[in-house]
Amino acid sequence: MAKRKSVFLHSPELERFSYPDTSPFKTNRAGLTRKTVYNMGLLSGEGRSEIAPVKATRVDLEQFHKPYYLDAIMAAEKGDLTPAAFAMGLGTADCPVFKGMYDYAALASGSTITGARLILSGEADIAFNPSGGFHHAFQDRAAGFCYVNDIVLGALVLAEAGRRVAFLDLDVHHCDGVQAAFYDRPDILTLSLHETGRSLFPGTGFENDTGVGAGIGFSVNIPLPVGTYDAAYKTAFSEVAMPLLKAYNPDVLMIELGMDTLAGDPMAHFHLTNNVIADILEELVNLNKPILATGGGGYNVENTVRAWALLWSTMCGEHTEDLSIGMGGVMLASTEWAGGLRDRVLLTDAGRRGDVDTEVRRVIAEIQSKVFPLYGLK
């Protein structure tokens, strides 16, 4: 069987831009990931390639975003930050104004759009944009480090070509911008595993949020408690997400691979290793559907880069079972990474584990009761 065509989407142009130094969001993660997988020989060979993205045009961006909002981004960058622009989330602590912000947003979102078009043309079976995953942006509002919603734009390209799309969000934060965009649509399934909004931004994405009108049952939220660990996370995925994905049977699977789920991330409260995400991704790859994957959150840069390198190797079909060392114990510039991607196993406090398990079981039962019958599942 021919190896699937896996495309890594990146350009040195993306490395020209950065949020202010005070921002936790570091755009250099994508370039560091690219350097890592290149040093490991994972950007060439059978079935693997690297492609520079095409910057999103104004027409592309207006497929979702309001013209006056895009104008406000451009004006703010030039020093014209009006009260109306501030009300649209611009110039806030999480969405600061910085030089090149419009061009960066257009190029990062263009990378996801490029991936969608490569899948439609058959040039890619799997495309990965580590600079994407801006799932908090709304039509006319920035939030959570997100100015332009590349996930929505990529999904629209696929849906308008007649493809049935499932979006699986594995970032620790709920994908409120994506959910809002598709809350009444039955042709785009939005499925999110995230830390509960009771303890984390943006405070949304509860298990009873399942869509409206024709979209009822096509927004599925799996809010998980503080301290969620690998086995509990995998249980939620296996007992809720995977059955729904199989029942929905999409033509294309979009995945957000935010690594703020990892233990020690300064912006969230999960206790995961990258092993569980790699194992889940391997299951998804084995569904043999076209995959458009993006980055997302991840505020411990070293752990995020190593995890994305592991996940890219998984998307390339490389065997990763034996790639295990201590977390953070590798040099990012090393070319000798034969065993440096997988995290060590973490132990979870027994008392907290019981509380986590109880809450996860409750959430699973609630979703299975409310949503599963809509898909003919028991």
Image: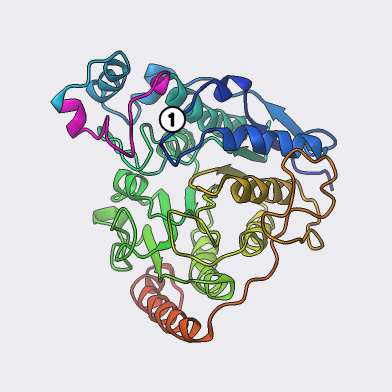
- Dividing the image into 4 quarters, which one contains the C terminus? bottom left
Against 117, is 274 above or below? below
Of all residues, the one furthest to the top in this rendering is 78
Tell me which segment is drawn in magenta. 84-102
- Decide if residue 170 is in sight here: no
Quadrant position of residue 197? bottom left
Against 102, is 141 above or below? below
The residue positioned 50% from the left and 72% from the top of the image is 236
- Decide if residue 159 is in sight here: yes
Of all residues, the one furthest to the left in this rendering is 83
Residue picked out by circle 1: 19
The residue positioned 38% from the left and 38% from the top of the image is 145
Please name the amino acid that badge 1 sits on. Answer: Tyr
Query: Looking at the image, which is closer to me, 311 or 316?
Result: 311
Task: State the image coordinates of residue 328 (x, y, percent, origin top left).
Answer: 67, 54
Task: State the image coordinates of residue 245 (x, y, percent, origin top left).
Answer: 52, 61
The residue positioned 63% from the left and 21% from the top of the image is 12
- What SS does tag 1 mark? loop
